[in-house]
Image (cartoon, rainbow, N blue to C red):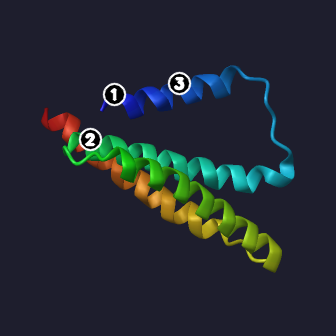
């Protein structure tokens, strides 16, 4: 359980101290990619707590969710529809569900 959490903390720390900036035209793609990655990390923590963690499922889900979310945002931009909002809503719901499950598990311990 500590490995996904360590990765999340390390990634946040690196992002906080690095002087990297993203051009505004890529902000939508990055934001849905980050949401997808956060969803995968929290899902990994949840599955580790439930003793169902599989690193192959985690890694493939992590990258495929990020790529699919960014692709959805890109296609939406090309056709003039804000499709990235669908990814934001879907990943937002899953993030809060995973956080609720993690919280309940920690309270029970």
In the image, taking residue 61 as reference, residue 15 lies left or right, namely: right
What label does residue 2 carry, if any?
1
Going from N to C along the chain, the mark reached first, 1 or 2, is 1
Q: Residue at x 58, y 55 (%)?
A: 66
Going from N to C along the chain, the mark reached first, 3 or 2, is 3
Question: Element at badge 1?
Answer: helix
Q: CA distance from mark 3 to mark 1?
A: 12 Å
Question: Element at badge 2?
Answer: helix
- Image position of 69 with respect to 4: above or below: below
Relative depth, front residue between 68 and 23? 68
Q: Which residue is mark 3?
A: 10
Relative depth, front residue between 18 and 92? 18
Question: Element at badge 3?
Answer: helix
Report x, y in % for residue 67: 62, 58
Marks 3 and 1 in Cβ contact (< 8 Å):
no
Q: Residue extending furthest left?
A: 108
In the image, taking residue 36 as reference, residue 80 lies left or right, namely: right
Report x, y in % for residue 55: 36, 44
Q: Residue extending furthest front?
A: 56
Q: Residue at x 49, y 26 (%)?
A: 9
Q: Which residue is mark 2?
A: 48
Marks 3 and 2 in Cβ contact (< 8 Å):
no
Going from N to C along the chain, the mark reached first, 3 or 1, is 1
Quadrant in which the C terminus appears: top left
Report x, y in % for residue 1: 30, 33
Q: CA distance from mark 1 to mark 2?
A: 9 Å
Circle 2 packing at 10 Å, graded few (<14), some (14-19), many (20+), is some
- Image position of 89 with respect to 106: above or below: below
- Image position of 2 with respect to 40: above or below: above
């Amino acid at each position: 359980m500590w490995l996904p959490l360590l990765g999340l903390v390390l990634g946040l720390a690196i992002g906080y101290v690095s002087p990297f900036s993203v051009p505004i035209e890529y902000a939508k793609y990055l934001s849905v990619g980050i949401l997808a990655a956060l969803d995968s990390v929290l899902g990994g923590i949840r599955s580790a707590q439930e003793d169902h963690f599989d690193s192959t499922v985690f890694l493939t889900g992590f990258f495929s969710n990020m790529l699919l979310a960014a692709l959805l945002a890109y296609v939406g931009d090309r056709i003039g529809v804000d499709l990235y909002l669908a990814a934001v809503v879907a990943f937002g719901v899953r993030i809060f569900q995973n956080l609720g499950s993690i919280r309940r598990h920690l309270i029970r311990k």
